[in-house]
Structure formats: structure tokens, C-alpha cells
Image (spheres, helix red, strand yellow):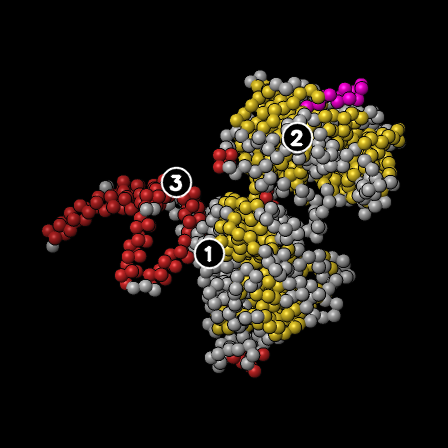
């Protein structure tokens, strides 16, 4: 029959519906696994396996995070952080690679650790004992023929009581021997170097009476006994890299190089030789501003070193060769001076040593033996150079491979702007935005196209009809200019693969969202949250800000980003490009900044350390709207309520319990939309929510107690309070207040079992305990916090949940109208994960010790369980390790179903969540091409069936 081909064609268009529910993991979310800015002495290429020639890039940052990076794509293979959440992160950290044993040895604080270079697993760890700290780590060279034995470790550790040089076994970290030096205090500069025949301990005391001498103690590597001791003259000027002198610790024959301003000469001493040489640097008719020393590491590396000289306009280098018999260093050749900033790195391959010079426009390879160029590669990433946006090169690491076709050079480059890049033969392979690891504060930039359209429509509504019509014609003409691009996007969306087309469409639907971050490096960085977290712009403000000033508040609106600092000053930049606009010095320092409504624009209020607010009139005359209320905390732990108008008036004072102090105060998020004032129960009755814009949630702590206060911010009356004992307050208590419920979390110690438990407490606020009852204010048409009947407290239902590990941050999803169910976002400190907990799971009205009734099931309630089980689908970060999250920002998108999430602190993570499902957007399973083909097939089928139907009707008429 004719219908068979039609049916067959339609069946071919059918597709499996399993893709409709496919996971959005790694599609709509993004993650920057950061390390921080690598340190010059702890960035290197290293082969994790002696049986393979493949090498990885290792870096230890100034945030004390060690990471292994794949040189091919810049992906982090593994990371280890040496700083706990409660630690300050101060001090120095060290990392050295093993020769052939596949280990990376690190030292930080009071611990020395050995890590497997391939997978980052801990091999062994040794605690040197408090209060000593590690001041240097070096590996002892292997003896000839020893290829399978782990290298032993030399460690310098100490404090005010002196320094101790120890040799630790490379296999398990056990102590082999130690040598003490009580004359070197905590302020002394110490280092250790080793050769195959001796260990050299170098110390230089600090102070005016210390002089310019360094003590060199020669130790026997087997027993640690002192063989000899001598003094050598050492200058104290800081070299490039931050050291007072350069000790060729990992060189085949260690040496000391130092200098002082104006850097006309360099002092050199071959360790083990009492002779000291003075090396005169070549004059370039300019004053040298800084010097750096580079040398190749390894037991077979030649005894050569490079002196990098830098002036205000030039960079050049001089290469010196060491005579091991006489102990002298002689100049071999000079590398030409260039006006571009240069970075020099040294790398050895067998018995050959190479120097790699990197500039913004080229990469040049030299041999340490002669001045001839072995290779020159023009850099292909010249966008910054052509636009004049070059940032100075800090330092880097290089790997040189010699083959039949020539040399191949890979350079790991660290720029002053915080970017970490790898360049292979002049071509950039990848760039990592390590500057994002220093973000401490963030804010969404509210510059959506819909806001501009609303302003245009409001303008048209406020003028005459003729003017409005002309204005609309002009607006439509400007919109018409984007028609070609719009048509192009339509074609691309049709021809693109279904998955990517849906993803791009969804990103357009949620809107263009940008987050501006303030960092400890005094930078403002804009991150495009709608485009995989790419850096939109970066502005360095370090030259304009005081050294002790830091960001405390960011405001982004009206095309500007305003950054308020702790010294009271204000910096303004363009929100689109990051261009600096102005800097205004403030007259009043601030510990906190608040933004409240004003008659024409929001008003900024500065709060000092005593908790006293002041309207920020030092930038521009401003008066806040009458009736604004704020809550402040003093450093002594007292809470104050203030009424802000023409001036600030204190309305109440709240003292905590004896021995406690208030540590945090939170209010409902700005723009916290509420779609319904009541909760519909299973029997169709309504439980009315207690919703007030004047609520504030305060937390007070002592050494082992936590007290929560829910207060009316206008009168200071306490609406609800509860206390918990046995807590471990290692940091701020995460608290949250939204809609008609609050949440907080803490970790406590059981005094009997000494077990640690983490609790998540949820409390819901209702106007009355009875459904369909609005309480004491039911008959009131107006409400005032000062009314006699305003003291009625809400009905509060609380419930606690035990979680598997501590929670370090809390946030809540936000949507435009508040229709979508909320989710509680939590950061798991130990797992380095971000989870989204549905509010239904945290419902405080879940029945306890019984199954839900029929009406309760209809409402969606289920039996209460004291343990909160986090399902894998609740993990927004999925399998990723999101390290060091300090803050989670959420904002509504253009879709009511979707909320945007952005987390920062060390790593940067962003995603889109739909707590109630994407009910206002088509899923990935929707295929426009398939839909069009289906319509065409149905149309063709209709044409084929139409004659049959007509014939059937005609035959039916003849029969009748």
C-alpha cells in the first residue's frame, strides 16, 4: 500500500528519548583549578618516571599549593595544599625534585614531605617539631651507580633558638644525622648546598653588628660532623627572586654569588674554597636596578652561571665559567641588551647547559659554552605587544630537547599580571589565570540588555506621543543594524550539533553575567560567568593604593565598578573595559561598607571598628532616605541598631552573654523575591509565612559555645535565640537568612566519645502555629515595628541534620520572581566540593519517628532522618576538586527556572542550577532539524493520502 513508505519514513525520524534527561555536568559549568603564582625557585620540568622521557611541569605557588601540570594542555593532574583552613598561610615553602627516584620533596611550616611525582600521593612525612619551621630543603646527590635508591634530604629548620641542619632518609624520612647552630636566630639568612663530597651550611646573621660576613660550615655528608669552617664576604642586597644571595645549591659544584647597589661588581665564592673573586659587570651607561643569577642543576651540569642585569630600559646578561682548580670565575661572553623586558632560565641536558631568553616578542636559545644562538623563535602571540599591553615577565622554567631536526624549547612563563603560560618554540600552548586565586571579594555586574530596554521604554512613556514615536523609530533603526548578525546566529544554531546548539541557546537565555573580583594583589578582575569563566579584563591598582589598604566592598552599577578600601578611599573603573576612571581619598577609615537606598541613588555607609556608621559624604554630598535601619558590630563584640537618615542615630544596643561576643550579622539577600506568602498544606489549608524585611540573624561565640539570635533590626527585640555547647569555632560560623527560614552550621566535640560531629540547623518562621491563622496581626491593615502589638513573635519550627563533614560556606539560590524552589548551597571543606541541598529535604516540618500521613505525602513531606545523606546528583562540582572556596555568589537569570552560581576564594567555579527543573526551556533532546523533517514528512504523507481519501469519498457516494 501507499501508506507503508510514509509510515517507514516517519519511523526513521524517531529518536531515543534518553538524551532528554542527560546530565549537564561539564557542559553548563566551568572550573578553574588554580595553584597560585608559582615561585621562581620551585617551578621546574621533571620526569616522574625514569623509564619514560615524558616530563611534567611542577609548580609550588606563594599560596603554598604544589601542583603537577600537563605541559600539553595546562591541565592540573594533581594538587596538594600545605595550608589548613584555619592557618594564616604565612612563611616560606620549598620544593625540590629527585634525580631518578620519582619523588618531589617539599618543606613548609613544621613539616617535610615526600610526594610521588606521578600521582601526588604522600610517600612519607616528618614533623620537625614546634616551634621550628623549615627554612630550606635540598637533596643529597646520589652516589655513582645508585639509580634505584631514593635521594636523602637535607633540611634546615629552626627559630629563635638557632638552626639545625638534618639529613633525612629518602625512603622513609627517618633522621640520619643533625648539626646544630645556636648562633643563627630566626632573623638569620640560612641555606644549604651539597656536592658528592661535602654538605655546605651557610648562615648570615641579621642586624647592624652582624657585618657583611656569612659563615660557611663544611659537613661530612655521611656523619654530619664538621670538617671545616670559614667566613666569606656577602652583600645583603636582594636579588631577582627575593634572596639576599644566590647559593648554587643544586649545582654540580655549589657557589655563592652576591651583590649590592649600584651593582657594579659581583662577589663570587666557590664553596669549599676560601678564595673570593670580585666580578666587574659591563657598564651600559645606565644604573642597574636589579640583578638575578641563573645556573643549571644536576650532577653532570657544567659549572657555569649567568648574571641577569636589568635597568629601567634594558635587559642583558653575562655568562661566567668557574675554574674548579683555582676557584675563580671568568667572564665567557655577554648576551646583547634589549629594550624589552627579559626573563632568563637555565636548563641542562646531560653535560650540556642551555640558557633560554624570553621576551614579549621572541624566544632565544643559547649554549652556556659559547655565545652563538642555537635557536630563535618569533612569538606568535603578539596581540599584547602590538596593543602595548605588555606586562613584565617575572620568571619561568625551561625544558630544552635536542634532536636531529634541531632544538625544541618549552618555556613555562609567569607574567607580572598573574598569568601562567607555556610557550613551545615561540607558540603559546595554554595560559592559566592564576591571578584569580587571590580573590577575596566579588560582586555581580548588573548591566543586562533588558535593563537598558526598560530604561528606553520608561523614557518613551514620559514624553509626548510624537517624541516617543520618533524615539522608537530611532531605536528600531539601531536594532536593525544587528539583523545580519542575528540571522547569522540563527543559521549557526540550526547547523550546529544539537548539544552545543542547546548549550549556546541556554547561555543566551540566562543572560550575559559578569562578576568583578577584588584580590589581595590590589587588582580588579572581571570574569565572564556566561562564557566558561574567561577573564574579561584586569586592572592593576597597586600603584594607586596605599600598601596597607585592602578591598572591603564592591559596587557595580551604572557602567562603573566602585571599589571601597579599608582606609576609606574609593577607586572607580569602567565596568565594560576595566579602564581606570578615578581615585578618591577618603577621610574616614572603614572596617565595613554598607549600601542603603537613597532618594536618587544608593547611599554608601562606612562602618568603623567601633561599629559606628557614617554616611560617605567625603566623596559626594549624599543623604539617605529616612527610615533605613542597619545593624553593626563592634570589635568588642557588641551589636548596635542604627536609623540612617540625614545622620546616624543609635536606636538600640544588644550585649551577648558573658564570655561571648557577636562575630557575624546577616540579613536577607538583596532582591530576595517571595512568590507566595503562605505554604499550602495537603488539606488545602494555608500556613502563613513570617516574612519581614527587618530581620537580622546574629551569631555570638565563645571558646566552646555558639548562640544564635534572630532579632527585629528596627527595635532590637529578640524574636528567637538558641545556644549550642562544645563547638569548635576555628573560623566564622556560616549563617543564612532568606524568605521565612534560616540556616546555620557548626562542628562540635562530644565530651564523652571525643567524636567530631557537624550539624546543619534549619528553622522556619510562620505567623501562627495554626493553618489559616495569621496570628495577632491578622486584622491589621498597616504594620509598624513600634506598634504596641508588634512584639508578637513568630512561630518557629527547627530541625537539625548531621552531615558527614564540616561546612565552610552557605548560600541560597535566587530567581527573579521566587517561584522556583530554593536550594541551599554548601561548601564541604574536606571534600573540596559544592553541594546543592533541596529545601524539601531540609523541611523542618518533616514528621519525626513516624511515617507521613496521606495529606503530608500530598504536600511532599517524608519521614525525618537525623542524618543528611548527600546524593551524588546534589554535588554541583561533580568529580571536580574545588579548593579553597571562601564565598558563593548567586543571582537570578533571565529564566525563572535558573539561578547562576559563582564560587571563588582559591579555585573559581561557576554553574547554572534549576532547582525545580528547566520548566521554561527546551532540553537537549529537542532537535530542530528533526522537528522540521517531521513536519515535512507529515506534509508529504498528507499529500499522498489525500487522493486516497478523495477516491474513498467518491466511491462511498456512488454506493449510496
Q: Which residue is mark 3?
A: 496
Q: Is residue 800 magenta?
A: no
Per the rendering, the mark at residue 558 is 1
Per the rendering, the mark at residue 309 is 2
Q: Nearer the viewer, residue 764 or 293?
A: 293
Q: CA distance from mark 1 to mark 2?
A: 47 Å
Residue 818 in percent (x, y) is at 47, 63
Residue found 53% across the figure and 52% down from its top: 582
Could you tell me which quadrant the N terminus lies in? top left
Residue 695 in percent (x, y) is at 57, 69
Picture layout, residue 644 above or below residue 917? below
Which secondary structure, mark 3?
loop
Camera-side mark, 1 or 3? 1
Which secondary structure, mark 2?
strand
Q: CA distance from mark 1 to mark 3?
A: 36 Å
Label 2 Cα neighbours within 10 Å, binned few <14 / some 14-19 / many ≥20: many
Residue found 57% across the figure and 70% down from its top: 647
Picture layout, residue 34 above or below residue 756? above
Q: Which residues are magenta?
A: 319-330
Residue found 34% across the figure and 46% down from its top: 482
Displayed quadrant of residue 710: bottom right
Residue 100 can be seen in this image = no
Residue found 81% across the figure and 47% down from its top: 131
Closer to the chain start, of discs 1 and 2, is 2
Q: Is residue 758 left or right of residue 563?
A: right
Could you tell me which quadrant the C terminus lies in? bottom left
Q: Is residue 581 left or right of residue 744?
A: left
Amino acid at each position: 500500500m501507499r501508506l507503508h513508505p510514509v509510515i517507514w519514513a516517519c519511523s526513521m525520524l524517531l529518536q531515543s528519548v534518553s538524551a532528554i534527561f542527560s546530565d549537564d555536568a561539564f557542559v553548563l559549568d566551568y572550573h578553574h583549578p588554580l595553584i597560585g603564582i608559582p615561585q621562581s625557585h620551585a617551578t621546574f620540568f621533571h620526569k616522574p618516571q625514569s623509564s619514560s622521557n615524558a616530563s611534567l611541569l611542577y609548580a609550588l605557588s606563594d599560596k603554598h599549593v604544589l601542583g603537577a601540570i600537563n605541559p600539553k594542555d595546562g591541565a592540573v593532574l594533581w594538587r596538594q595544599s600545605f595550608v589548613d583552613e584555619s592557618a594564616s598561610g604565612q612563611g616560606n615553602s620549598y620544593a625540590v625534585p629527585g634525580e631518578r627516584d620519582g619523588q618531589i620533596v617539599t618543606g613548609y611550616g613544621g613539616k617535610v614531605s615526600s610526594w610521588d611525582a606521578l600521582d601526588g600521593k604522600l610517600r612519607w612525612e616528618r614533623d620537625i617539631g614546634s616551634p621550628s619551621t623549615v627554612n630550606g630543603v635540598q637533596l643529597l646527590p646520589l652516589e655513582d651507580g645508585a639509580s634505584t635508591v631514593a635521594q636523602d634530604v637535607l633540611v634546615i629548620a629552626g627559630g629563635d633558638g638557632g638552626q639545625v641542619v638534618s639529613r633525612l632518609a629518602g625512603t622513609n624520612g627517618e633522621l640520619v644525622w643533625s648539626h646544630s647552630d645556636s648562633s643563627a636566630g630566626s632573623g638569620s639568612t640560612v641555606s644549604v648546598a651539597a656536592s658528592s663530597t661535602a654538605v655546605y651550611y651557610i648562615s648570615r646573621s641579621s642586624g647592624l653588628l652582624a657585618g657583611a660576613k656569612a659563615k660557611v660550615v663544611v659537613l661530612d655528608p655521611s656523619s654530619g660532623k664538621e670538617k671545616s669552617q670559614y667566613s666569606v664576604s656577602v652583600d645583603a642586597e636582594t636579588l631577582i627572586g627575593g634572596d639576599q644571595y644566590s647559593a648554587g645549591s643544586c649545582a654540580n659544584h655549589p657557589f655563592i654569588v652576591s651583590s649590592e647597589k649600584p651593582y657594579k661588581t659581583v662577589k663570587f665564592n666557590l664553596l669549599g674554597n676560601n678564595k673570593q673573586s670580585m666580578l666587574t659587570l659591563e657598564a651600559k651607561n645606565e644604573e642597574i636596578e636589579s640583578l638575578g643569577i641563573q645556573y643549571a642543576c644536576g650532577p653532570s651540569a657544567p659549572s657555569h652561571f649567568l648574571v641577569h642585569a636589568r635597568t629601567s630600559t634594558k635587559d642583558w646578561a653575562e655568562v661566567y665559567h668557574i675554574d674548579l682548580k683555582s676557584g675563580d670565575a671568568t667572564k665567557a661572553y655577554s648576551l646583547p641588551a634589549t629594550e624589552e623586558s627579559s626573563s632568563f632560565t637555565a636548563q641542562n641536558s646531560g653535560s650540556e647547559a642551555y640558557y633560554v631568553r624570553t621576551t614579549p616578542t621572541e624566544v632565544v636559545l643559547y649554549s652556556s659554552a659559547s655565545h652563538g644562538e642555537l635557536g630563535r623563535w618569533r612569538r606568535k602571540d603578539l596581540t599584547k605587544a602590538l596593543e602595548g599591553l605588555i606586562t613584565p615577565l617575572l620568571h619561568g622554567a625551561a625544558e630544552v630537547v635536542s634532536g636531529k631536526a634541531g632544538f625544541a624549547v618549552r618555556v613555562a612563563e609567569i607574567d607580572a599580571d598573574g598569568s601562567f603560560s607555556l610557550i613551545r618554540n615561540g607558540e603559546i600552548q595554554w595560559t592559566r589565570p592564576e591571578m584569580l586565586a587571590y580573590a577575596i571579594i566579588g560582586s555581580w555586574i548588573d548591566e543586562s540588555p533588558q535593563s537598558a530596554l526598560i530604561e528606553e521604554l520608561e523614557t518613551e512613556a514620559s514624553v509626548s506621543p510624537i517624541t516617543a514615536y520618533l524615539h522608537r523609530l530611532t531605536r528600531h533603526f539601531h536594532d536593525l543594524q544587528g539583523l545580519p548578525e542575528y540571522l547569522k546566529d540563527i543559521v549557526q544554531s540550526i547547523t550546529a550539533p544539537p548539544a552545543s546548539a542547546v548549550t549556546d541557546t541556554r547561555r543566551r537565555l540566562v543572560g550575559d553575567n559578569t562578576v568583578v573580583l577584588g584580590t589581595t594583589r590590589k587588582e580588579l578582575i572581571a570574569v565572564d560567568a556566561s562564557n566558561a569563566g574567561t577573564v574579561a579584563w584586569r586592572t592593576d591598582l597597586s600603584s594607586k593604593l596605599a600598601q596597607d589598604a585592602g578591598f572591603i566592598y564592591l559596587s557595580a552599577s551604572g557602567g562603573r565598578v566602585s571599589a571601597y578600601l579599608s582606609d576609606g578611599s574609593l577607586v572607580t573603573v569602567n565596568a565594560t573595559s576595566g579602564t581606570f576612571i578615578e581615585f578618591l581619598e577618603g577621610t574616614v577609615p572603614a572596617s565595613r561598607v554598607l549600601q542603603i537606598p537613597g532618594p536618587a541613588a544608593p547611599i554608601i555607609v562606612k562602618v568603623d571598628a567601633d561599629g559606628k556608621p557614617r554616611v560617605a559624604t567625603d566623596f559626594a554630598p549624599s543623604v539617605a532616605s529616612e527610615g533605613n535601619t542597619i545593624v553593626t558590630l563592634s570589635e568588642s563584640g557588641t551589636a548596635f541598631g542604627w536609623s540612617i537618615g540625614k545622620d546616624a542615630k543609635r536606636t538600640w544596643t544588644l550585649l551577648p552573654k558573658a564570655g561571648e561576643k557577636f562575630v557575624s550579622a546577616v540579613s536577607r539577600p538583596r532582591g530576595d523575591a517571595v512568590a507566595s506568602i503562605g505554604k499550602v498544606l495537603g488539606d488545602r489549608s494555608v500556613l502563613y509565612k513570617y516574612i519581614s524585611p527587618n530581620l537580622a540573624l546574629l551569631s555570638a561565640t565563645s571558646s566552646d559555645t555558639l548562640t544564635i539570635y534572630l532579632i527585629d533590626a528596627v527595635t532590637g527585640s529578640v524574636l528567637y535565640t538558641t545556644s549550642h555547647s562544645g563547638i569548635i569555632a576555628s573560623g566564622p560560623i556560616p549563617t543564612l537568612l532568606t524568605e521565612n527560614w534560616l540556616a546555620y552550621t557548626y562542628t562540635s566535640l562530644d565530651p564523652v566519645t571525643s567524636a567530631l560531629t557537624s550539624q546543619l540547623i534549619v528553622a522556619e518562621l510562620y505567623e501562627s502555629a495554626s493553618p489559616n491563622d495569621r496570628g495577632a496581626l491578622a486584622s491589621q491593615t498597616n504594620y509598624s515595628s513600634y506598634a504596641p502589638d508588634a512584639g508578637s513573635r513568630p512561630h518557629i519550627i527547627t530541625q537539625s541534620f548531621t552531615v558527614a563533614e564540616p561546612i565552610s560556606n552557605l548560600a541560597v539560590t535566587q530567581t527573579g520572581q521566587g517561584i522556583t524552589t530554593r536550594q541551599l548551597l554548601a561548601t564541604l571543606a574536606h571534600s573540596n566540593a559544592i553541594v546543592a541541598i533541596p529545601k524539601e529535604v531540609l523541611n523542618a516540618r518533616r514528621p519525626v519517628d513516624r511515617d507521613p500521613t496521606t495529606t503530608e505525602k500530598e504536600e511532599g513531606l517524608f519521614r525525618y532522618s537525623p542524618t543528611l545523606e548527600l546524593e551524588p546528583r546534589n554535588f554541583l562540582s561533580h568529580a571536580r576538586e574545588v579548593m579553597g572556596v571562601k564565598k558563593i555568589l548567586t543571582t537570578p537569570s533571565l529564566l525563572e527556572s535558573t539561578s547562576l552560581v559563582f564560587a571563588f576564594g582559591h579555585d573559581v567555579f561557576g554553574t547554572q542550577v534549576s532547582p525545580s527543573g528547566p520548566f521554561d526551556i527546551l532540553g537537549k533532546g529537542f532537535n530542530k532539524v528533526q522537528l522540521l523533517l517531521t513536519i515535512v514528512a507529515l506534509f508529504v504523507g498528507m499529500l499522498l493520502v489525500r487522493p486516497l481519501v478523495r477516491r474513498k469519498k467518491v466511491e462511498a457516494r456512488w454506493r449510496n
